[in-house]
Structures are given as structure tokens and as C-alpha cells.
Amino acid sequence: GQNIDQPTEMTATEGAIVQINCTYQTSGFNGLFWYQQHAGEAPTFLSYNVLDGLEEKGRFSSFLSRSKGYSYLLLKELQMKDSASYLCAVRDTGKLIFGQGTTLQVKP
Amino acid sequence: DGGITQSPKYLFRKEGQNVTLSCEQNLNHDAMYWYRQDPGQGLRLIYYSQIVNDFQKGDIAEGYSVSREKKESFPLTVTSAQKNPTAFYLCASSIAASAGGELFFGEGSRLTVL
């Protein structure tokens, strides 16, 4: 079967660091993606991991462990505009499967 | 500019009516996808197409139909058989379904059944 799990909601303070976890079980694996989605808008691409390890892109970093079926998205120096949903997605033999998303609220 | 265009952005439908959502891309992407999103939920895959004249069912294909007659176009028809069609529909494309390229999304179509 296919299963991608993320926490439903998280709250963090402006300027802080937050880590959003994602665990997955899929029949195939050809990469893991993180997307950001503001309310009522389309998702926008944040990061892609296909090999184990950490990928850093500015304030955002993403980590992957294929043996553990685990990834996390790390957001540093949080800003109010980072309040959004963060979607973890796994590419499984031609299709991209999404988790239910984590709604992050950044407070002053 | 290259991108994905969905239309209409908002659509109202009476129960029992079929409705077709348009999705066009000029990115020269081989793969195209349709997702459905309900409030507070993630994206669920309806149909996807890896190449012209071919498509596969996703996790929630019942009550929907698609066609892929041209590389640029992947319209979705929401039929009267879909029991709860009110949702936000997102079309996406990628270079190839099996490759690692990310999905590019259109702005979405919000369908409301009255």
C-alpha cells in the first residue's frame, strides 16, 4: 500500500527554526518532494531529494533517509509569510503521491 | 511565458450535470496530472497521463474522465456519477512521469455544486 504521514498542524515563533517530519511507505520510490501551499493557491516547489542526506536551499533544507522512509523539511529564521501548508510528496512509479499536508502557523 | 493554464477558475454546477475543466500547458512536458483537494486536506490523484493518447487512473478516478489527444491539453470531466464533486481541482505537468522533475501546477479550478 501507499502511506505518507505528516503532522496536521504546527506552530512556531517568528525568527525560530521548525522541523516538519514526513514518513512514507510506497511500493516504489523515485524521489521525495516538498511543496509550500498558501491558502487558496496552487502548491509551489520547495525541494527534491532522491539520495540520502541533506539538501540546503537558503532558509529551507530537506533531509532524506530512504532506509527509514523518512524525510524532514527544516525552515530557519521563520518569517510571518512562512505561514502556509507544507506538503510532502513521493514519486512512485510515474505518479506523485501527496501526504495530507502540515499547516504551519508562525506567530510574532 | 511558459506555464499551465486552468479554466475556469470558479465554476458552479447543478446536481446531475457534467462539467469539463480545461488544462493547457506550453512547457513541452510529457506528463500531466489532475488532483483534487478538499478543505484542510492534501492532494489526491484523480488521473495522470505519461504520454499522448494514454492515461492511468489515480486513487479517486470514479466519477471522472479524461482525454489526452494533444500533448498540451489534458481536460478533466466531472460527471454526474461523482457523488461529492465540490472541491478545488489542480492540474499539473512534469517533464516525464518517471523522471525526477518536479510538478508545475496551474492556479486551480474551484468547483461548487449547488
Image (cartoon, coloured by chain):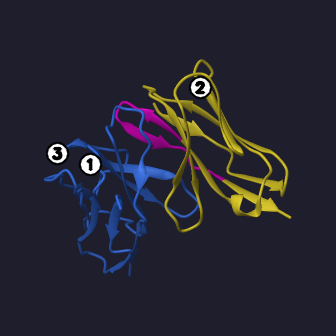
Q: Which residue is mark 2?
A: A69
Kindly report the distance in space between the C-alpha atoms of the residues bearing marks 3 and 2: 33 Å
Image-quadrant location for residue B109: bottom left
Circle 3 is placed at which residue position?
B52
Count of numbered marks: 3
- Residue shown at 28%/56% (left/top)? B26
Q: Colour of chain A?
A: yellow
Between the C-alphas of marks 3 and 1, the distance is 12 Å
- Element marked by disc 3: loop
Please give left or right for residue A26 compared with residue A82 in the image.
Answer: left
Mark 2 belongs to chain? A
Across and down, in percent, residue A100 comes to: 57, 49
Q: Where is residue B63 drawn, in percent x and y?
A: 28, 58
> Are there few (<14), some (14-19), or many (20+) residues within 10 Å of tag 1?
few
Residue drawn 68% across and 44% down?
A58
Q: Confirm or deny contact between disc 2 and disc 1 (CB under 8 A).
A: no
Does the residue at mark 3 contact the one at mark 2 (Cβ under 8 Å)?
no
Q: Chain of mark 1?
A: B
- Amino acid carrying label 1: it is Asn
Amino acid, disc 2:
Gly
Q: Secondary structure at mark 2?
A: loop
Q: Which residue position holds label 1?
A: B28
Q: Quadrant of the N terminus of chain A?
A: top left
Residue range of the region highlighted in magenta in the rendering: A89-102
Instruction: Give the CA distance from mark 2 to mark 1.
Output: 32 Å
Is circle 3 on the same chain as circle 2?
Answer: no
Q: Magenta stretch containing residue A7, yes or no?
A: no
Sequence-earlier tag: 3 or 1: 1
